[in-house]
Image (tube, rainbow, N blue to C red):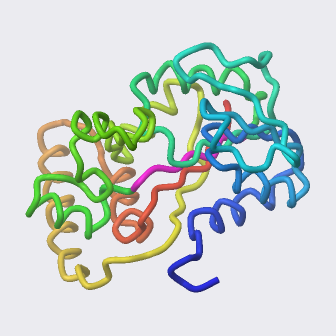
Amino acid sequence: MGAKDKNYLLEKIVEIIRTEQKGKVLDLGCGDGDYSVRLQELGFDVIAGDMDVKRFKHADKIDFRVCDLTQRLPFEDGSFDHILLAEVIEHLRNPYDVMKELSRVLKKGGKLIVSTPNILNLKSRVRFLIEGCWEFFRETPLEHSLNPKEVIWNVHLIPWRYHELEYLLKCSGLLVEGIHTSIYEGKGYSFLVPAIKFQLQSKQNRALRSGGMDQSRINKILLSKEVLFGRHLILKTRKD
């Protein structure tokens, strides 16, 4: 497999989850099922869930369940030790409802791994400055959804910053344990980092002078190499 064909997101997710205690995993929004197969090869008991059964390629190996994310998931409370939600959350029209459902079917202390395009990397920020759209969010949802070759759940609807995604998870009882990415890119934009550091520090100083919120925690995250240069934002979370 060449570098262009390598699925860096899949490989990073495998790296993250392989050290976890083996148990029952829900691969939600599983697509063709390649992630499910890799998780099963690691020794996890995998159930794959998606709306499109025709796209799933591994029915001979993996237990597949039809899961409509606009409805209650067909699982009992606390059914899973781990849940994978890879490149799904940006497609959802009801993300808070979905995340509450994931928290419901996840065991206490269970882990959710969620990934989404990282719109805050420097490459994406420069694209927004020039085009007015983030990386991976260049096509307008309405026209994209009207394409007869597409299906509505393939449309990217919500570009998630780390800030709002962390809040969404916290509202569902999920605490961020680790911030990761798939591959680093955009190193040619490193000259912008000093300006970003200056802006964040200035904002912090103004807030503290006026009795506002201490933003040192979030600023540290925003200046991490995962956020500044990572193609994907991958969060490992734990149900509180």
Residue at (41%, 71%) from the top-left corner? 225
The quarter holding residue 51 reads top right
Query: Could you tell me residue 84's position as x and y percent?
Result: 66, 44
Quarter of the picture containing the N terminus is bottom right
Segment colored magenta: 111-117
Residue 67 appears at what percent x and percent y?
Answer: 65, 25
Quick one: 193 or 146, which is closer to the camera? 146
Main SS of residues in magenta? strand
Query: How many discs mark residues in the rendered view?
Result: 0
158 vs 19, left or right, is left
Q: Magenta span has 116?
A: yes
User: Against 118, is 239 above or below?
Assistant: above
Percent across and percent down for residue 105 are 73, 23
Q: Is residue 223 above or below residue 158?
A: below
| Quadrant into which the C terminus falls | top right
The picture quadrant where one finds residue 238 is: top right
**Rendered residue at 65%/37% (across/down):** 28
Is 174 on the left or on the right of 87, as rendered?
right
